[in-house]
């Protein structure tokens, strides 16, 4: 009985949080400036939770996380500009996530065989490569950046993806794959001796 009550606490707390903030926005108590602040908070929560999976739980010192964030951001913005609708916005979100994950997979294969400072230097260099590429592409409008990106982000989408990211990462860490990542952080050599494919799980987290 107590376990069931504990399981209900988190969903109820999430729903209350969503409802209270939505009510404050609807009543005009939270103005446009404060909504922009909430947007930045939620984006940084998503980024911090995902980086914590790599650095905190898998133990890989990566400095290139902003590069993957920029890939997702540019792809979503470009798709939304080409398809100015809610469908285009949602498609851009998922397409941006998929392309960032694919690039992470390609980059992870060679770099995650490195360890410690070598991995940090490699990921930092890759983040700089991504930045320079975007600064020299016509589709991203170079250093000037994209202008006139349609604004479809609201509290509903922010809450959905922020809470969803936390729930997905939490469930992943409680799975066998998540425990493998934690074992790699604690002792990579011991993990390999127990039959864990460390490169596979590091790439998966990456």
Image (cartoon, rainbow, N blue to C red):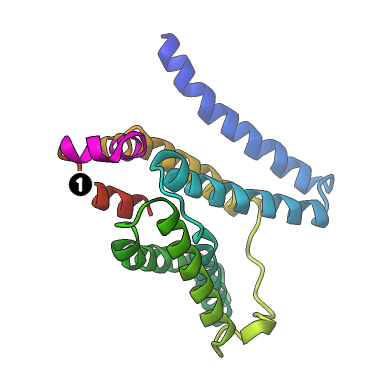
Query: Residue 84's x, y, as percent?
Result: 58, 77
Seen as rendered, the residue at the extreme bottom is 138
**Residue 93 visible to the viewer:** no
Name the side, left or right, on which 189 lies relative to 206. Answer: left
Query: Residue 145's x, y, as percent?
Result: 66, 80
Query: Residue 13's x, y, as percent?
Result: 59, 28
Seen as rendered, the residue at the extreme front is 117
What is the crowding at mark 1: few (fewer than 14 residues within 10 Å), some, or many (at least 20)? Answer: some
Q: In the image, what residue occupies the spot 26% across and 52% down?
A: 199
Quadrant that contains the N terminus: top left
Q: Is residue 159 magenta?
A: no
Please name the residue that numbered disc 1 is placed on.
Answer: 197
- Magenta residues span 180-194
Q: In the image, what residue occupies the spot 54% across and 87% down?
A: 137
Task: Considering the whole magenta stretch, tell me its main secondary structure.
Answer: helix
Q: In the image, what residue occupies the spot 58% across and 54% down?
A: 157
Q: Is residue 23 above or below residue 34?
A: above
Res 7 → quadrant: top left
The number of numbered badges drawn on the structure is 1
Q: Is residue 5 above or below residue 143?
A: above
- Of residue 95 and residue 131, the one placed in the foreground of this image is 131
Q: Is residue 188 magenta?
A: yes
């Amino acid at each position: 009985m107590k376990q069931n009550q504990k399981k209900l606490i988190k969903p109820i707390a999430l729903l209350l949080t969503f409802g209270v903030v939505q009510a404050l926005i609807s009543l005009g108590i939270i103005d446009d400036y404060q909504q922009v602040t909430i947007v930045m908070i939620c984006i940084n929560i998503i980024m911090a939770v995902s980086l914590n999976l790599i650095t905190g739980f898998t133990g890989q010192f990566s400095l290139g996380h902003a590069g993957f964030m920029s890939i997702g951001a540019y792809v979503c913005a470009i798709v939304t500009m080409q398809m100015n609708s809610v469908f285009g916005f949602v498609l851009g979100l998922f397409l941006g996530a998929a392309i960032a994950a694919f690039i992470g997979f390609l980059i992870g294969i060679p770099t995650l065989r490195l360890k410690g400072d070598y991995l940090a230097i490699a990921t930092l260099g890759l983040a700089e490569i991504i930045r320079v590429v975007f600064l020299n592409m016509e589709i991203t409008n170079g250093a000037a950046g994209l202008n006139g990106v349609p604004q479809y982000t609201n509290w509903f989408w922010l809450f959905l993806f922020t809470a969803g990211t936390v729930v997905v990462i939490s469930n992943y860490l409680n799975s066998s794959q998540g425990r493998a990542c934690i074992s790699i952080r604690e002792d990579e050599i011991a993990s390999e001796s127990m039959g864990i494919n460390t490169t596979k799980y590091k790439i998966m987290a990456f």
